[in-house]
Amino acid sequence: MPAFHFELVSPEKLLFSGDVESVVAPGAEGQFTVLKDHAPVMTTLKSGVVTVAGGDGKVEKLFVRGGFADVNAAGFTILAELAVSLDEVDVAKLDADIKNAREDVADAKSDDVRQVASEKLAQLEELRASVGA
């Protein structure tokens, strides 16, 4: 299958850059797959997993939370609000972080503090759902 260039960038770092055969991304209107010579498109992303298939048969999965996707003649670029490789997620630590975040929500003394704690909990739970088992 023909390859095209793909990059996934978060505010912290460049998570992926290379030639790939396909990328499945969580668009705001639903998942979409990009292959070589895809029509130009720009869309927002929702939280979910980006699946990158390389020419060597290797598949890499990355979690993104929001951002933008841009497909053009030069390739495909995702600018994510937050992104992490699912291979790098420590599930035990993530579960402990979720437990702590739930306690923070329960212990919140004001609506503002509760709102911040609830947002953090929602983000952690989105990541946990993407990791699976």
Image (tube, helix red, strand yellow):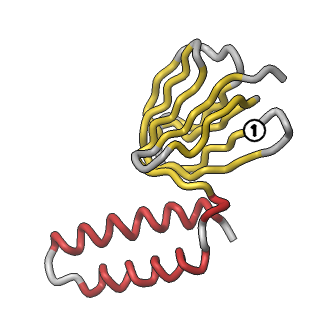
Q: Is residue 99 above or below residue 41?
A: below
User: Which quadrant holds the C terminus?
Assistant: bottom right
Q: Quadrant of residue 21?
A: top right
Residue 63's place in the image compared with 30, above or below, is below
Mark 1 surroundings: few (<14), some (14-19) or many (≥20) residues within 10 A: some
Kind of residue at badge 1: Ala
Looking at the figure, which quarter contains the N terminus? top right
Please, is residue 103 above or below residue 73 in the view?
below
State the image coordinates of residue 16 (x, y, percent, origin top left). Answer: 60, 41
Q: Residue at x 71, y 19 (%)?
A: 36
Q: Classify residue 20 as left or right of residue 17.
A: right
Residue drawn at x 26%, y 87% is 107
* Residue at mark 1: 53
- x then y, percent, for residue 95: 54, 79
Location of residue 90 with respect to 119 vertically, above or below: below
Element class at badge 1 = strand
Residue at 61 percent across and 36 percent down: it is 17
Residue drawn where x is 75% and y is 38% of the image: 53
Asked whether, in this view, residue 44 is left or right of residue 4, the answer is left
Q: Position of residue 58 (x, y in %)?
A: 81, 44
Where residue 108 appears, x then y in whole percent?
22, 82
How many callouts does the rendering have? 1
